[in-house]
Image (cartoon, helix red, strand yellow):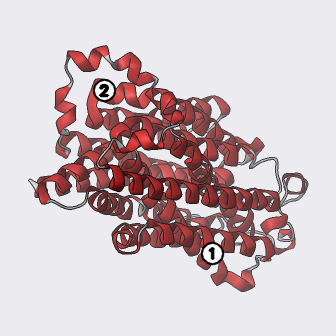
Amino acid sequence: MQCSQMKNILILSFGILLLYTAYMGLQTLQSSLNKIQGLGVASLSVMYVTLSISSLLLPPLLIKKLGCKWTIVASMFCFISYSLCNFYPSWPTLIISSILVGLGGGPLWASKSTYITITGNKHAEMSGQPAQHVVNQYFGLFFFICQTCRVWGNLISALIFHLTPNAGSLDATNQTICGAGDCPVQSAQSANDTAGPTKTVIYILLGSYTGCGVLAVLLIIIFLDQTHTDREKNKDSQTSCCSTLLSALKHLRDKRQCLLIPLTMFSGFEQGFIASDFTKSYVTCILGLKYVGFVIICFGVTNSICAALFGKLAQYTGRIPLFLLGAAINIGCIIGFLVWKPSTSNFAVFFVMSALWGIADAVWQTLLSSLYGILFEKNKEAAFANFSLWESIGFAIAFGYSSFLCVYIKLYILMCVIVIGILLYGAVEYIEFRNSLTVTEEGPKDHDQHATT
């Protein structure tokens, strides 16, 4: 039985890996590939605005109606539309496909997290292990596999772009506005433009990404088992759908959820920065478009390795030291981006900064997700809906101001959000410590009741 649960985690992980290989590969390139009038980042901003709405309203309803497995399948079709619409990038095509991805993204992430938590709890119950340790390990394994999507997606783009000999070349005289000093007004007035790849090369890239999405859907449909709760969709679940639609909003009455909002939003902010501003204002600006894939591969490698490492390490160190480590690395990188003057003479620094950012992101992706599953075990769907909501709002804001603010201002915003977020996370840990003492003294009680206002 435990082998069956591990099989399901692996199938889910590789299915999401294939899907996100295409999606993350395209997301990383949007700020450089479709930069006319800010089309690329504008479509990403619309995507995450829609995602924030769908995260709040759709997951509880769809998971109740379809179950985790078929919610994942339905959501995957929305992501495939984004690859297809990039064959003809325009405001109508990219905005419509972005809305579809946003509608599917919330249910996909919530159902994935719910599926992993249910499977982990079942394994823990059968093996007699602490539930939070098993859930941490399962999330770590999932993100170890899934986060390599940045490696494969960007490796595909890097290799394919090298089919165009001059793609991404840049005149050295236009490198003065790169890095933290890159501002939208200056960029528009300069000749800081890269030579774009040919249509044939782009079509090969998009065809490869579309194929990855199709394989992902087939893998989930054929091999992923339904969870036990998926098979229990009866009349009671149908009558409760209206009430579960509001459960995500009601979940905000839990003060722990409210305190986690800034850190959850930072997860979106920092991913938006690395995917948009770092790739455009640092990598493409100095090295050219064809190096974006190779630099982001460093992010993906450290991200996937640390996701698995932190998921296992948390049971020995606890999660607090790892959260502090992630915050310290992010703050150090932000300071580094502010003072660094990127140039071809410090070629290795591009890869080092990308790798360090990947280590920090592994903390937020792995431990923050599992923290939601552990703290709100009795209300998982609503909790993960809120996780997707606030993270996607962070994404939407990051991509939304990408075409209007200077890079150094964005870095100061990141600094403020991470400091506030980690301080409020400390308050959550204090609440949990205080509640654990109360439970020890008074006997077992409903843990969630202690934490609500």
- Give me the residue at 43% from left, 71% from top: 306
* Vertical relation: 296 (above or below) 262: below
Secondary structure of residue under mark 2: helix
Q: Amino acid at mark 2?
A: Lys
Outermost residue, bottom direction?
345
**In terms of depth relative to the viewer, which is nearer, 361 or 200?**
361
Q: CA distance from mark 1 to mark 2?
A: 42 Å
Q: Which image quadrant for residue 145?
A: bottom left
Q: Which image quadrant for residue 118?
A: top left
Residue 18 visible (yes or no)? no
State the residue position of label 2.
Answer: 64
Asked whether, in this view, residue 108 is left or right of residue 166, the answer is left
**In terms of depth relative to the viewer, which is nearer, 280 or 121?**
121
Residue 205 visible (yes or no)? yes
Precedes in sequence: disc 1 or disc 2: 2
**In terms of depth relative to the viewer, which is nearer, 242 or 217?**
242
Where residue 341 sits: x, y (%)? 80, 77
Asked whether, in this view, residue 28 is left or right of residue 131, the answer is right
Would you call the spot at circle 1 few (<14 residues within 10 Å), some (14-19), or many (20 or more)? many
What label sits on residue 293 in the rendered view? none
Outermost residue, front direction?
441
* Vertical relation: 390 (above or below) 134: above
Where residue 15 sits: x, y (%)? 31, 50
State the residue position of label 1.
Answer: 353
Mark 1 vs mark 2, foreground winner is 2
